Structure formats: structure tokens, C-alpha cells
Image (spheres, coloured by chain):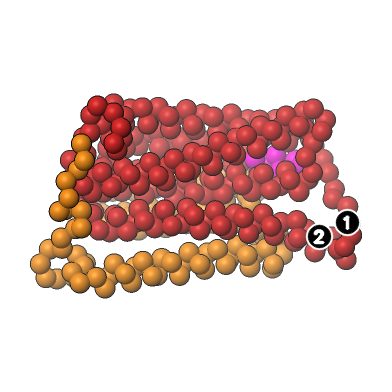
Amino acid sequence: MTIARHEPFADLARQHDADRLGMVVFLSSEAMLFGAVIMALLALRAWEPAAFAATSGRMDLLAGSANTAILLTSSLLVAIGAEAASAGRKRLTMTMFALAALLGLAFLAIKGTEYSIEYLEGLMPGVGPKQDFGSPGARMFMDGYYLATGLHAVHVTVGIALLAGCAWRVHAADPPSAVAIGNIGLYWHLVDVVWVFLFPILYLSR
Amino acid sequence: MALRPLLLTWLALMVLLAATIGATFLPIGQWRQLINLTIAFAKAALIVWLFMKLRTEGPLVRLMAATAGMLLLIMATMIVADYHFRPDPFTRGGPPPVSPLATRTVRP
């Protein structure tokens, strides 16, 4: 799918810049949002190192690691899909985006299982019959954990909808523009980048 | 279609993931935190540069992406300055710091 030059752009390079710039500005605003949350977690870790490490140790390392691998792999599929789109191979784009959406669902399933286990262990702040934090710092960790992973899960959900919708439209022979396909890919990669930072801070600060 | 760079990037990301999990179990104290954060930045750089194709973008788009990084850096600097220059930061000598959380009780 090659992109033709259109008015008012003098050449393809400037048109491409204009196509991308809006999305990159939006993704930058997303980076600001998650950056603030991540820095709040780092500040808490500096302020309450013992409680932070102890509560991080109660996170499910296997589930967190699996989810990181799942998101990194889905990012690869999305990158291949976007590459296929610019090479005009629409079926491959559809397959890759659909598989990436499935991996996104797997991520949410594992995350949901973690949430339910934490609920039973009394680690969900203010919810459930049991509350077992041990220290105020641990409670703050879990507050931050749910804020960060919850906000991230919302973005994963939106990303799955975008990927699945895109795959469906390619399947129905009504594909989104090449620019839109590229931007959906960029969004998914940013969701991945956010998790790359959340994973070591929340799961590996033990 | 050039799939080779993408697959190599994925492979590098997986190796870094294994490294960061492995580093967590090394008996090197707080250095682990530094290693883990460095690896996180390396992974993010690989994704942004090769998966998000910043490598092939023009200066305008790169500048916008760098602006996001700069703004986050400014914010990080301010947060570090804030915590470092508080009256009784735990990072320096003197009596042990009292966390603002310590005086409160956990709501059941």
C-alpha cells in the first residue's frame, strides 16, 4: 500500500511528517501521563524502601514475566503487520494484528487472574473481606500498583479494540488507511513501552 | 519486507527480559534496581527506535519524541531535588526519617 502525495504537501516526506506528527504528539501526552505515575512509584520506593521491597516480593513474578514476554511478542507481530501493510500484503497484516489482539487478551486474562488472587490474599485496597498489608507503605504500594496497572490495562483494552477492528476491516475488504494502520501500531508499541517500565518497578523491586 | 531486523529486535528484547529477571536474584543489593532500570531503558529504546521506526523518521517527528523525553527528565530532576532536600532525608546522616505514612493507621 503505497501512499500517494496529495495537496497541500510539496513532497512525500513532508506529507509523511504531517501524518505522523499528530500521533507522536498524542503519544507524548500519554508518556507524560504514565511518566508521572511511574515517578510516583519510584518516589515511594525511595521513601519506603523496606515496605516497597516486601510488597513487591508478594507479586507473582511468573505472571508478570509471562505478561512482559506476551506484550513484547505482540509488539513484534504488530511491527511485522505494519511492515506488511506498507508492502501491500493485507492478509499478513490482518493475521498479525489479529494474533496481537489475541495476545493482548491473554495479557488481560493473566492480569485479571493476578487481581483475583490479590483480592483473596487481602491485597486489594479497601475491597474485600480481608485486608492484609502489614504497613502503610505496603498499602501505598498496592494503591500505586492498581493505579498504574489499571490505567495500563485500560490502554491495553483500547489497543486490542483498535487491532481487532483494524484486522476485521482488512478482512472485510474495507481497510483503514495506511496512515491509520501505522498509527494503531505505534499506539500498541507505546502500551508495550509503558509495561517495560512498570514490570521491573512493581515486580522486581524485591 | 525486511523482517530480519524486527526478529533480531524481538530476540534482543527477550534476552534483556531474561537478564532483568536474572539480575533480580543476584546478591548485589541496591545495584539491582539500577541494572533493572537501565535494562528497562534499553528495551524501551529498542522498541521506540526499531518497532516504532523512529530510525526512519524525519527530524520533526524525532524532535517531538525527544521533547517528551526532555519534559520527563525535567520532572524527574525536580522530584529528585524535592526528595533529596527535604529536612530529614533518609539518604543522609542524622536521626532516622519519619515517613509521613508512619503516623497513620491502615484503614481496614
Q: In this figure, which residue is indicated by the disc labeled 1?
A: A5
Residue A110 appears in the rendering: yes
B24 sits left or right of A67 in the view: left
Say which residue appears at 59% left-offset and 54% top-offset. Answer: A27
The kind of secondary structure the magenta stretch mainly shows is helix
Q: Nearer the viewer, residue B49 or B63?
A: B63
Residue extending farthest left? B95
Residue B80, magenta (yes or no)? no
Residue A80, magenta (yes or no)? yes
Q: Which mark is residue A39?
A: none
Callout 2: residue from which chain? A
Residue B105 placed where, x, y %?
16, 46
Q: Earlier in the sequence, mark 2 or mark 1?
A: 1
| Contact (Cβ within 8 Å) of mark 2 with mark 1 | yes
| Amino acid type at image mark 1 | Arg
Tell me, yes or no, whether dots 2 and 1 are on the same chain: yes
Q: Which hue belongs to chain A? A: red
Query: Quick check: B95 above or below A26?
Result: below
Residue A200 placed where, x, y %?
38, 48
Provide the residue span drawn in magenta.
A78-85
Callout 1: residue from which chain? A
Query: Quick check: B24 above or below A26?
Result: above
Q: Which hue belongs to chain B? A: orange
Q: Nearer the viewer, residue B61 or A125?
A: A125
Say which residue appears at 89% left-offset and 60% top-offset. Answer: A7
Q: In this figure, which residue is indicated by the disc labeled 2?
A: A15
